[in-house]
Image: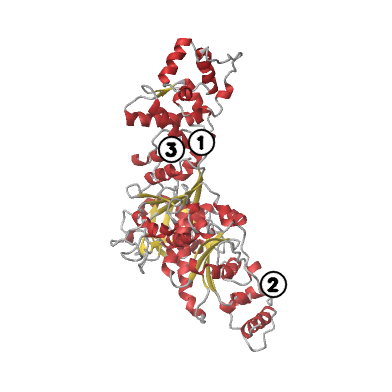
């Protein structure tokens, strides 16, 4: 044991057991000393034992993330904004739940292994009962923002770290999360982390306020500030009021302002708290000058500048009205489904996220229409007039992925063009980047993509300065990314960057809108070809009876073939591709009671036997007999042969 660690343990034991020499006072903050005592007395932690970081397995981590799914998506924007302020300074950002489990993480992937060993990683558990005195755990225990710097930590293995955390409260005043900014190394004086503490507090305030706006979009929201200049753009105090003028939500600063004797302001009336009646809220809308929008806190007389945000009108603007009665989906999403309940549920959830910046992940079997859904999301969003750039990650050669995605400067490597290349990510700037088959991207390229998602910046090959990029990333895969993560074939941090929301497209065999889809595809071809296509009952039955292992893509190909070979737009059974004809429909056909022995002397029997052997497929029969389809039709008419499915 080195001398620094031994001295730390000695001090820790003396403080936690109360054996400080008479006349001497500890230099530690009281909050740190109290935490040390809790670790020994309450948590039964041994100060002489170093502990490995406790990182939850993926299944348990998913449970923690799912429990705060909506909050996590909203808070992500705050993390990304804060990280942009400290990028390159060696900091890592952690967002934990109220139990201390890290549910989101942003850090420099080049220090990945070091961060994981230190516990500064997704899934790490920083509860004080497990990790001892630390910023997250002690913040949870005290509900206070604080810095736990180097030897403030209880566990001696954490001495190199400096960690600063602040609690994030929900709009009802309960602890929802903890935002932590940590570094593997830092200057020795604790004062060096003062700015980090102020930044964490500022961004926690932004996250709490954004969460309030998100939760109470249909209620009155009142923004209050002691400063006239910041009353609208960055208010200190924000609270939500229901239609009766009672407080239904607040950010934490508003809680501290309005709480009396520790009692929450939740449920109290507006008139009880301010020298103003709820009916007067209309006088605090933005149309009046800020200096005329003042009120006073009834309890203290504190003057505050106010802005009231009324709930939206009951009747929505025409441009936002549903396209169809009872169907609120935007048109691009509405036309993806013909009413299948499973797919409709996916589209309804997706419609709520079309204008967020969070990354989306679309999962489904090959051919289910993942790219079609991604395009619909793009068309339904405010990015619709910007590029939609699709990248097939499985089709790009591994040695070209980085140059294709990130671009390169002129002459940056052998073979580089003289003009350089912009790169697909920058091509998608302002729009949507669709990463198809993301599960097949090599690990080496995943690291660079991770930085794009975390920092919203791209560094083309051969360039030293990063370029800011604004893209909405949608990934798609038919593979199980969780299993790939377990197998070490896909980065777990990239997985959690991509799966802001996951949508699973059902396979065609499970959808209940096959007839609608067939009708729509035939209508598209009719418009393209100027021919009115229609299906005979037998052809439609064959399409309905097929299992569609290739999903929508296979259906598209089958209908393209049928339209091409049909006569005058009438699609009959023999116009359907053979694999579709043979997939199960014909097992339901009645067996012929008597089979005529085919002989060269009986051409009718020979034709009938050939037709039966080929499941009454005219094209296949013609090929087997070495004649044209018209010859087969003519001979069937001549011999009075009728297919079983046409017998009626």
Q: Earlier in the sequence, mark 3 or mark 2?
A: 2
User: Mark on residue 635?
Assistant: none
Nearer mark to the viewer, of 3 and 1: 1
Indicate whether 426 appears above or below 320.
below
Q: Is residue 373 above or below residue 134?
A: above
Which residue appears farthest toward the front when viewing the image?
A: 600
Q: Secondary structure at mark 1?
A: helix
Between marks 1 and 2 in the image, the one whose residue lies nearer the viewer: 1
In the foreground, 88 or 21: 88
Q: Which residue is mark 2?
A: 45
With respect to residue 614, does 150 lie above or below?
Answer: below
Coloration mode: secondary structure
Marks 3 and 1, the one that precedes in the sequence:
3
Identify the residue shown where x is 38% and y is 25%.
Answer: 533
Question: Callout 1 environment at 10 Å: few (<14), some (14 to 19), or many (20+)?
Answer: many
Q: Are the residues flagged by discs 3 and 1 in contact, CB closer than 8 Å?
A: no
Looking at this view, is 75 or 182 the one in front?
Answer: 182
Q: Sort mark 2 into few (<14), some (14-19) or many (20+) by Cα contacts within 10 Å.
A: many
Check disc 3 and report the residue beneath it: 336
The local secondary structure at tag 2 comes to: loop
**Which residue is depicted at the point 49% across and 48% down?**
477
Q: CA distance from mark 1 to mark 2?
A: 56 Å
Residue 508's disc number: 1
Q: Position of residue 482 (x, y in %)?
A: 57, 53
Which residue is depicted at the point 51% across and 34% down?
548
């Amino acid at each position: 044991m080195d001398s620094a660690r031994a001295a730390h343990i000695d001090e820790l034991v003396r403080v936690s057991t109360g054996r400080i020499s008479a006349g001497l006072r500890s230099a530690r903050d009281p909050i740190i000393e109290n935490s040390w005592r809790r670790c020994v007395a309450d948590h039964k932690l041994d100060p002489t034992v170093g502990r490995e970081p406790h990182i939850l397995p993926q299944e348990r981590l998913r449970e923690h993330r799912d429990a705060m799914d909506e909050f996590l998506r909203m808070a992500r924007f705050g993390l990304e904004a804060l990280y942009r302020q400290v990028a390159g300074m060696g900091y890592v950002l952690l967002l934990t739940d109220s139990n201390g489990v890290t549910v989101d993480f942003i850090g420099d992937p080049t220090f990945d292994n070091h961060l994981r060993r230190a516990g500064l990683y997704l899934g790490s558990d920083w509860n004080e009962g497990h990790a001892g005195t630390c910023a997250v755990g002690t913040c949870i225990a005290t509900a206070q923002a604080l810095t736990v710097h180097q030897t403030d930590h209880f566990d001696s293995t954490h001495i190199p770290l400096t960690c600063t955390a602040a609690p994030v409260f929900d709009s009802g005043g309960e602890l929802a999360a903890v935002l932590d900014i940590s570094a593997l190394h830092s200057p020795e004086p604790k004062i060096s982390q003062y700015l980090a503490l102020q930044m964490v507090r500022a961004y926690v305030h932004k996250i709490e306020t954004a969460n309030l706006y998100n939760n109470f979009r249909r209620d009155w929201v009142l923004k209050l500030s002691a400063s006239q200049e910041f009353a609208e753009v960055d208010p200190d105090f924000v609270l939500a009021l229901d239609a009766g003028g009672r407080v239904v939500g607040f950010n934490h600063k508003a809680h501290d302002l309005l709480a009396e004797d520790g009692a929450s302001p939740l449920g109290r009336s507006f008139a009880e708290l301010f020298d103003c009646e709820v009916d007067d809220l209309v006088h605090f809308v933005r149309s009046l000058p800020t200096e005329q929008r003042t009120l006073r806190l009834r309890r203290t007389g504190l003057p505050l500048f106010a802005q009231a945000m009324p709930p939206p009108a009951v009747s929505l603007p025409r441009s936002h009205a549903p396209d169809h009665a009872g169907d609120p989906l935007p048109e691009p999403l509405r036309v993806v489904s013909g009413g299948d309940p499973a797919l409709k549920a996916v589209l309804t959830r997706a419609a709520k996220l079309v204008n967020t910046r969070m990354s989306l992940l679309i999962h489904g079997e090959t051919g289910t229409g993942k790219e079609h859904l991604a395009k619909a999301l793009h068309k339904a969003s405010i990015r619709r007039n910007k590029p939609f750039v699709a990248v097939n990650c499985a089709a790009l050669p591994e040695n070209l992925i980085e140059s294709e995605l990130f671009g390169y400067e002129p002459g940056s490597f052998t073979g580089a063009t003289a003009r350089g290349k912009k790169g697909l990510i920058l091509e998608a700037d302002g729009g949507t980047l669709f990463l198809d088959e993301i599960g097949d991207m090599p690990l080496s390229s995943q690291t660079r993509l991770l930085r794009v998602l975390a920092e919203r910046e791209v560094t083309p090959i051969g360039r030293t300065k990063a370029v800011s990029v604004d893209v909405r990333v949608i990934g798609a895969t038919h593979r199980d990314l969780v299993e790939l993560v377990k197998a070490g074939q896909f980065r777990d941090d990239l997985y959690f960057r991509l799966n802001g929301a996951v949508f699973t497209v059902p396979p065609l065999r499970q959808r209940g809108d096959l007839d609608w889809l067939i009708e729509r595809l035939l209508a598209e071809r009719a418009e393209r070809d100027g021919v009115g296509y229609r299906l005979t009952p037998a052809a439609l039955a064959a399409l309905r009876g097929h299992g569609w292992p290739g999903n929508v893509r296979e259906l598209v190909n089958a209908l393209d073939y049928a339209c091409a070979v049909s006569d005058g737009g009438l699609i009959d059974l023999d116009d359907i591709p053979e694999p579709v004809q043979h997939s199960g429909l014909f097992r339901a056909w009645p067996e012929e009671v008597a089979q005529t022995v085919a002989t060269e002397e009986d051409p009718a029997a020979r034709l009938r036997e050939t037709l039966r052997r080929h499941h009454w497929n005219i094209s296949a029969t013609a090929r087997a007999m070495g004649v044209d389809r018209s010859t087969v039709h003519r001979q069937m008419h001549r011999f009075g042969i009728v297919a079983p499915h046409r017998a009626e």
